[in-house]
Amino acid sequence: NSGDSTILTPSLGLLLVFRTNSSYTRWDEARKFWGLNINHTRDLCRMATSWYGYQLPKSRDGLPPVIDPVKREEDLKHLSLCTWAFVRSMKRHLSPAGEDEEDFIAELKSRLPAEQAEKVITAAHRPNRALYDLSVAIEKLPMHFMRKNEINNNLSIFEDTLGGSERLLSSPVPLFYSRHTARFLSTWLLLLPFALYDPFKGSWNHISMIPATAFISLCLFGIEELATQLEEPFTILPMQGFCDKIGANCDEIVSWSGQYDDEFPVIVKTFEDSERLWDRVLTKFRKSS
């Protein structure tokens, strides 16, 4: 009767609210992890690009070091690829088994050196291996160790986002919770026509009760389906788009010039560039004195 339905309705409402809220919390947490990845990959490449080539806090003669432009481009490009390889490996690690395995292998082999790509592909934990390669790439950059420490702080954040994502992946919403909600909702909707029988007695043969029951069922089952989809956030988040965005941003950042470009031609390609460097240095010192 309608009295029984009135008693059960608040309980069903609370159950649906709690279920939807817990599922959305999982989705929101997963999205924030990827947001941190996007932000800190940019930060990592920005610091590496602007600090490249400065091993000492201040050079003894006050001059910037001479940087080989080819090596600088190779080192920063490799850093950008290692950064991309980590997030791409993380995406593959969090995706269902076999979902994009072939695409993952093809992408790594097309962008990374063959030996490095093979080591990542065959690793037991691919994101850890990719993160290790990124750490090695940072360590090889010619800059002061304090600045390397600042860059390495981003890697610790990557470890946190990876661990948090693995926690969400390995700790789904308990199955009995989902089943109980589905059974409760199905039973309530099955008995709903009995509660609506008297309120719709004014319509011919209670015909209006049919579309009303169908509409209520559609809305409530929609809420249940929404919660079910949000429970597994890594199946609905556009992680491939995040990886492509990170790769494009990192490639753009490492293509920029380094420090002191307005004061000194830091990247010296020829002997004539070296002479111009000394002319500008002497001119600067004369003006300052």
Image (cartoon, grey):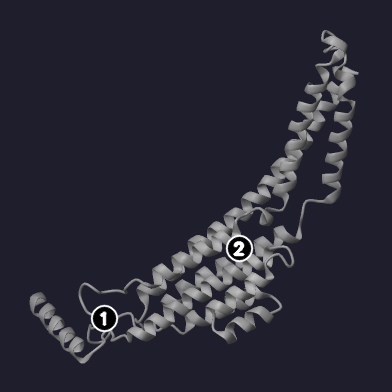
Q: Can residue 26 be seen in this view?
A: yes
Dots 2 and 1: beta carbons under 8 Å? no
| Residue 238, position as x, y percentages in the image | 60, 56
Return the x and y of residue 169 as percentages of the image width and height: 72, 60
Q: Mark 1 points at which residue?
A: 266
Which class describes the residues within 10 Å of circle 2: few (<14), some (14-19), or many (20+)? many
Q: Residue at x 35, y 82 (%)?
A: 53
In which image quadrant can residue 178 be found? Answer: top right
Question: Mark 1 is on which residue type?
Answer: Val
The residue carrying mark 2 is 161
Is 110 above or below relative to 218?
below
Which residue is at a point 84% across and 40% down the rendered structure image?
182
Q: Position of residue 25 (x, y in %)?
A: 66, 47
Can you see residue 46?
no
Q: Residue at x 68, y 56 (%)?
A: 235
Q: Quadrant of the N terminus?
A: top right
Q: In this view, does 273 lie above or below 35?
A: below
Local SS, label 1: loop
Q: Residue at x 70, y 58 (%)?
A: 168
Identity of the amino acid at label 2? Answer: Thr
Q: Which mark lies nearer to you, 2 or 1? A: 1
As drawn, which residue projects farthest toward the top? 202
